Amino acid sequence: MRISLAQLNYHIGNFESNLRLMKNAISEAKAQEADLICFSELATCGYPPRDFLEFRDFIKRSMEVVNELCKMSKDIAVVVGAPTVNPEINGKDLYNSVFFLAEGKVRHIAHKALLPNYDIFDEYRYFEPAEEFSLVEFKGKKIALTICEDIWNLGNNNPMYTVCPLDELRSGHPDFILNLSASPFSYAHSAERLHTIRANVQQYGIPMFYVNCFGGQTDILFDGGSVVMSPDGNCYDEMPFFEPCIRTYDLQEVIRGGQSREQAKEKTELIYRALVMGIRDYFSKLGFTKAILGLSGGIDSALTAVLAVDALGPENVMGLLMPSPHSSEGSVTDARDLAENLEMKYEIIPIEQGIQAYGSMLEPWFQGLNTDITEENIQARIRGMLLMAFSNKFKHILLNTTNKSEMAVGYGTLYGDLCGGLAVLADVYKTEVYELARWVNRNEIRIPLNSISKAPSAELRPGQKDSDSLPEYHLLDPVLYQYIEQRKGPEEIIAMGHERNLVLRSLKMVNQAEFKRHQAAPVLRISSKAFGQGRRMPIEGRYLI
Amino acid sequence: MRISLAQLNYHIGNFESNLRLMKNAISEAKAQEADLICFSELATCGYPPRDFLEFRDFIKRSMEVVNELCKMSKDIAVVVGAPTVNPEINGKDLYNSVFFLAEGKVRHIAHKALLPNYDIFDEYRYFEPAEEFSLVEFKGKKIALTICEDIWNLGNNNPMYTVCPLDELRSGHPDFILNLSASPFSYAHSAERLHTIRANVQQYGIPMFYVNCFGGQTDILFDGGSVVMSPDGNCYDEMPFFEPCIRTYDLQEVIRGGQSREQAKEKTELIYRALVMGIRDYFSKLGFTKAILGLSGGIDSALTAVLAVDALGPENVMGLLMPSPHSSEGSVTDARDLAENLEMKYEIIPIEQGIQAYGSMLEPWFQGLNTDITEENIQARIRGMLLMAFSNKFKHILLNTTNKSEMAVGYGTLYGDLCGGLAVLADVYKTEVYELARWVNRNEIRIPLNSISKAPSAELRPGQKDSDSLPEYHLLDPVLYQYIEQRKGPEEIIAMGHERNLVLRSLKMVNQAEFKRHQAAPVLRISSKAFGQGRRMPIEGRYLI
C-alpha cells in the first residue's frame, strides 16, 4: 500500500480555499500512485476554528467539503479531519472527527478521545471525547486512526488524561497508525513530538504516519514537520518545517525501516523561520501585502524589520524614523543604516511639532506640574499615531516591535509603542532577541552592529536607559522564564538562586501589567507559554502585588 | 438547626482581605446564633482565579485561609469553597472543592462534578470532575453539598453533561441541599436561577440553601441574589442583588415553608445596578478612585458619565469636552448641561492645534491625497491621547464609552475612541442605551433630552451621521442579537424575516472587526454573550466575510 501525507496551510473558515488545496493534493497523490491520502486535523475548516464551531452553518459548510472529498475518493482513499455533530442528546454538541472516505463513500468515522484544554487549547469547550474505539480496514490492512493528542498519553503517563486510545485499539491488531494533527509550533516542540511518536511506535511495534498542518493562524503557528516512523524506531522521513509537502510512502518499505531522515532543529533558526511565516500568513490571510513599522535605531525594531522584509519583500516594508529632541544621534543613523542594508523604504518625521501641540493644548492644566511618565507616553503615542496614519492612508498593517521582556514587565506605552496589528517579538525575550540578531547577521551585516552593542534605551528623556527602570535583562529574563513558562512561584524561583528582591519585584511588575497585555496585539507564539489566549490572568487580581 | 448564608464580595488572589471578610461574617453569624455558616464557591481565592490556579504557591495560600477558617469552626460549622490538589496521578491537578469544617477539624471535602467550560468558563482547564458522591452529617442532619453548576443538570436534561450529582446523592436521603455558587450576572440569569433551584427542590422534595457571591471581577459581574427555597417550591428568601448580606435561617421554618420573598427583576434596573457595581469594584480592587471620560454630547458618553458618577461620586469623575471644527454646537452645550446636571467636573480642550500639528507633520506624504478615514481617525486619536494624558498625570482610569452595536460592527477608532481601562457599555446595544437613558431620567432630567433625541453621529466630518455607514440601530440590533447571543447563522436569521442584504452586511462587519475587539478594554458583561473572554473568535478567519 502506498500512503500519501499532505502537509498543507489551511485558512480558518475559508472552505473554498481549503477544498481547492485538498483537491490539488489528491491529484498530486494520484500522480505519486498513492492508494490513500491523509490530511490533518480539522483540515476542512482550519485549526483552531474557535467559537465558529458554535454555528451550525459553519459545521454544515465543513460537511459540504467532506462531501466533495467523498466524491473524489473513488480511486484513492481520503482521510480527513472535520467536526461532526454528536447525535446523542447528552454530552457536547460536536466531535473532533476523522473521516475515512473510500470508493465514494464514508467508510468509517473515528472521534478524538483526548481533548487538550490547556494553554491555547479549548477543545473541551466544543467537543465530546470519544468513548468507542475501532479500527478501519482498507486493502487488507487494519488502520488505527488517531487525532493529535490521542497519542500523547502513552502508558497512561500524562496526568491530564485517564484513557490511552491506542491501548484500546491494540486488541484489534492494527497494521499501522495514522495520526492527523494540528500541533502548534514552539521552539522545543518538534523534538518532543519526535520523541512521543517514537515511544508510541516502539510500544506498539507498528509504524506511524503522522501528518501535521503548517502555517500561521494569527498568533498560533504550525510548523508541519510531518513524520513517518518505522517500527525499528528510525525516523523514516520528517517533512520540512514551515512549507507545504506532499509525499507518498510504500508501507512495506516503511515497515522494513533502516532509514533515518530527520530535520535540523536549531532553536534560533526555528524561531526565525516561525516568525517569518507568522508575518507572511497574517498578511496573506487578511488580504494585505504591505507592512509599516517604527525604526528607533534599537535592536527590537531592527530585528522586526529584517523579519518583515524576509516575509514580505523589501518593497513591501516601510520604516518610519520619528526622532524627538531626546533621541540620540544614533537613533536616526542606525535606523537609516538598517533600512539601507535591507533596501527597504524609510521616511523621517520629527515629532517635535506634535510634542509642542500637546504641550500647548494641555498647558492650562499641566503648567507648574513636574514632568513625569505622562510626557514620555505622549512621545510614544505621537509615534503610534503617525504610524497608524500611514497605515490607514496607504493600507499597511503596523507591526509591533515589543519584546517579551518588555511585554512581561509592562515597559511600554499603551496606545504608543504597544500599537500594532501583530506583535512580532512579544514572545521573544530580550536576551533571545540578541541571539536572533546575531543569527541574522551570520553571513552579512544586516542589523547595524551599533544597534546590537549599544545599551537598550527608550530615549523618552535625556540619558534614559532601560536599566534605570528594569533589572538587567540577563538577570530578569531567567526569572521571567521560570514564572511564565515554568509557572514557578516566588519561593521556588528564589530557591533556585535568584535574588529575592529581584524576584519579588519582577513578579509584581508582571502581574501589574496585565491590563496592558489585555489590549495588546496578537503575539506570534514561539515558546511553550506566550502572552495571549494561552495565558489567562485576572486583571484586577492582587496576587503577588 | 440555624443556617447562615454569607453573600460577600471577594477579591481574586487577595487572601488576606478574603479571610478578613469571612472572619467578620463568622462573628456576625454567631451573633445571629447560627450553627453553620456557608460561603460561596472558591471563596478563599475569589472567582474566577483563572491561570493563577496553575501556581502551587497560589493553592498553598488558599489552603492557609482554609486552615485559619478551620480554627474558627469550634463553635460553628464553616462551609467554604476552595481549590484542592488531586492526589491521584491521573486526571487534572486540582478539584473545585467545598470544605465542611466543624469542631476545629476538616469533617468532609466534596468536589464539583459538573465543570462549566463554555462562554466565560474554563473550569475543565484546571479541574478534574468529582466521580464520588457522599453526604455529610451534622447535628443529626444529612447535607447534600453541591457546587454551582452541579444543580444545573436536573433529570440529566442539560446536553453538556452526562451526570446528575443530586441523583447520585439521593439514595443517602439528604435533609437539605447546600449549593455554593459563583454564578455570574446577566440580565436574564437571576430568573433562570430561581427556576432551576425550584425545579431541584421540587424534584428531591427537600429545601435548598443557595449562596452566591457578588461583586465585579473586572469584566465578570456577580449579582448575589442568594436563595433559600422551601420544599413547597416557595422562595423562602432571595437576598438583595449587588450588595453584601449575611442572614440566618431556621431549618424547620424553611421546611415548613409558606413564605415567598422574591426580589424584583426588571431588566433595565438590573443592568444599571450591575454596571454601577462593575465600575465601582474595578476601581476599588485596582486601588483607584478617580475616573475620566470624554463627553461628546452624545448619549453613550452621557450614560457612561451617569454610571460613573453613581459608582464613584461626582467629585471623582472628570469629563473632557474636546470639540473639533466638525463638532456641532450641541456637542459642547449638551455635554456641559450633562456635567452641570451631574455636578461633575469638566474641562474644554479644543483639538484643532493637534489636528494642525499632525496635518503639518504628515503633509510631505499626504499632500494632494483625498481626505478619508485617516483624518477621522486622527481626530479620535487626539482625543484618546488627551484623555490618556490626564489619566497619566492625575491618576484617573479612562472609561470607554463604546456601545455594543458599535463594538460589534467595528464602528470606532482603535487607539482613539476605543481607548480606556474599562468598556462600560460595550455589552449594551444602542437600543438598550436609549432604554437605560430614559430609565436614569425617570425622576429628573440627568441626561439632557437633546442627547437622547438627536441622531447619533461621530462628528468626524461635516454633517456625518451613524446611519451613513451603518444600518439604523433598530434594524441592526436584532440581527446582532441573533448572531452574537443566539449564535444563529445567516440563513437562520434571514428566515426570521430580516432583510438578506442587511444580515449579510452586518455579519460581515462583525467578523471583520475582530482585530479591533482583540485590543479593546475589558467589557462589563451584562448579557449572556459579551465580547471578551466569553466569545473567542479567530482574527484572520474568513467565515462570512
Image (cartoon, coloured by chain):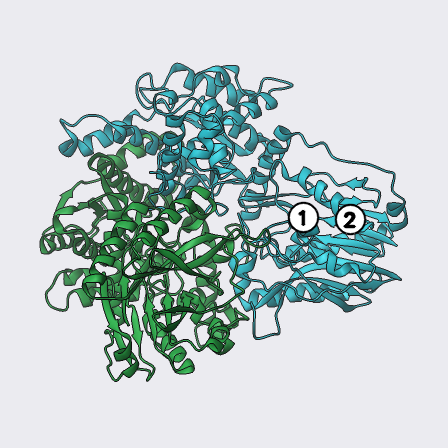
Chain colours: A cyan, B green
Horizontally, is B236 left or right of A262 in the view?
A: left
Q: Quadrant of the N terminus of chain A?
A: bottom right
Callout 2, which amino acid?
Gln
In this rendering, the label closer to the viewer, 1 or 2: 2
**Residue B370 percent coordinates (x, y):** 38, 42
Q: Which mark is residue A203?
A: 2
**Residue at 63%, 19% in the rendered image:** A442
Badge 1 density bin: few <14, some 14–19, many ≥20, Cα 10 Å: many
**Residue A291 percent coordinates (x, y):** 50, 36
Horizontally, is B533 left or right of B230 in the view?
A: right
The answer to whether B460 is drawn above or below residue A134 in the figure is above
**Residue A187 percent coordinates (x, y):** 61, 35
Quarter of the image where one finds residue B375: top left
Residue receiving disc 1: A213
**Secondary element at image label 2:** helix
Q: Which mark is residue A287?
A: none
Callout 1, which amino acid?
Cys
Alpha carbons under labels 1 and 2: distance apart: 25 Å
The answer to whether A479 is drawn above or below residue B151 in the figure is above
**Residue at 73%, 38% in the rendered image:** A240
**Residue A507 percent coordinates (x, y):** 40, 34
Which one is in front, B20 or B506?
Answer: B20
